[in-house]
Amino acid sequence: MIEGDTALPQAVLLINTNVTQPPVSPVGLEYVGEALIEANLPVRVLDLALENDWKSGLARELAREEPLIVGLTVRNTDDCSFATRKSFIPWITEVTTEVKRLTSVPILLGGVGFSVMPKAVLRLTGADIGIAGDGEEVVPALARCLIDGKDISHLPNLVYRQNGNIICNRRANVNPELLPLPRRHLFDNRRYEELGAIVGIETKRGCPKQCIYCADPVAKGASVRLRPTNTVVQEFRDLLTSRVSWFHLCDSEFNQPLPHAKAICRAIIEAGLGDSLHWYSYCSPVPFDLELAMLMKRAGCTGINFGIDSLCDEQLLRLGRSHSVDDIQRLTRILERAELDYMFDLIVGGPSETPATIATTVEVVKKQNVPLVGIATGMRVYPGTPLSRDIANGTIREGLHPKGIHEFHEPAFYLSPRLGDDPFQLVHELVDGDPRFLLLVSPDEEESYNYTDDQALCQMIEDGARGAYWHILSKNRGQTEGTL
């Protein structure tokens, strides 16, 4: 823009591409959009999840006025299910191709899914630029460079094409304490709640744990960065003003670190919001104590999803987990005393898993009377994780599906060869029809908790069910008391 020119620059157009049903609100994209607004840069949004005809909606938005850049969010690269192995990259490619047909402005990709495997996704989709990692600082900086005609190749977190290659710049994490308060007015969060979604909020970002399969440290950073409690409370207030009251805390583990989780709960209680909120979170089994459980309940927590993975100590060590079966026993006693609804997520088929270790896990679940358990058979292999490195260096030589796969942008999974030819049948036999167990299989199967385009779940929501999708399914199966 010419110096002294007071005309507004072209807007950044941000597009939510996640059209799976039931819907998921685009919290990360909204945080980036509001950072652009704080930097006095114009923003427009298009939410394909709320469009009856996405191509018509895209054409309408691009016909209004040519944007400076078009940003597309990539929340997930696939559905993380060995049973279905549904990749979302072809869909992102289709949207990218349609944008290119309608405009010649640069196309920017970002989001957690993109950040896990940025080079592969940029190459496969044909997009021009990407942001791997936090976007709140670099996207406004990118927009300023484009407006002023300056070079962009020095920007952190940038992924771009150069001389036929794709370059990934150094990663830089934002400090949440320095970010502006997101007002959450860019996307129609009230409409999302009406459609059955629970609206996302972050209280922290990043995860330092070393679980061998988890891509969160790759996508979000390996250090925990805490949001100020007053900022989180104000974000809740603003969304309540928009008549949104069902929430999901998007943290990798809400209780890591424990003092911050307690501080968030106390701030919500002191603000008088606990009776107005219904929220869910992911938590680690440790550290977790009765004080936190009671604070969470008073602050409006409606249910907790615990990443347990296994209830066999040997297998937990192999998966890089820091908790033990004794810790789980203490945890279940705390949750029962606090009268909090919860579920355990398990992964079977990791390195050296055997029928005996799975049987041990199922036996402990029943002995502890865990109300709801989700079982994923097969471990998704993401680039940058300890599991992918062990496969690449030959430490793990068998168990990869499909066999011979080299690029993990395809839905690639590890399954212990010691489980035989039909691990799914093995799990079915061990579970033996117990209704507390949900399985990560095709969404059309009765015991499934694969939420991607699950028509039965969508029907429950249309009939009035609200809450985390696992909680809705559990209530339908008669496993927990719930609120509608």
Image (spheres, helix red, strand yellow):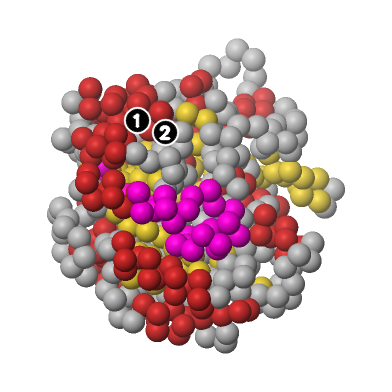
Q: Which sits in the foreground, 287 or 475?
A: 287
Q: Residue 317 location in percent, x, y?
A: 58, 56
Residue at 30%, 31% in the rendered image: 265
Stretch of the chain drawn in magenta = 301-330
Q: How many circles with numbers are drawn on the protein?
A: 2
Residue at 31%, 68% in the rendered image: 366
Q: Disc 1 versus disc 2: distance between alpha carbons?
A: 6 Å
Please rate how many residues cluster around mark 2, counting C-alpha atoms within 10 Å: few if below 14, some from 14 to 19, many from 20: some
In the depicted structure, whether residue 279 falls above or below residue 440 = above
Q: Which sits in the foreground, 426 or 177?
A: 426
Q: Of the numbered discs in the image, which one, if any, rests on residue 262? A: 1
Read off the residue under disc 2.
258
Q: Residue 203 location in percent, x, y?
A: 41, 33
What is the quadrant of the C terminus in the image? bottom left
What is the quadrant of the N terminus in the image? top right
- Residue 484 vs residue 102: left or right? left
- Residue 259 vs residue 9: left or right? left
Does residue 236 show up?
no
The quadrant holding residue 214 is: bottom right
Q: Secondary structure at mark 2?
A: helix
Residue at 42%, 33% in the rendered image: 258
In the depicted structure, whether residue 105 falls above or below residue 53 = above
Give yes or no for contact between labels 1 and 2 (Cβ–Cβ under 8 Å): yes
Check residue 328 for magenta coloring: yes
Identity of the amino acid at label 1? Lys
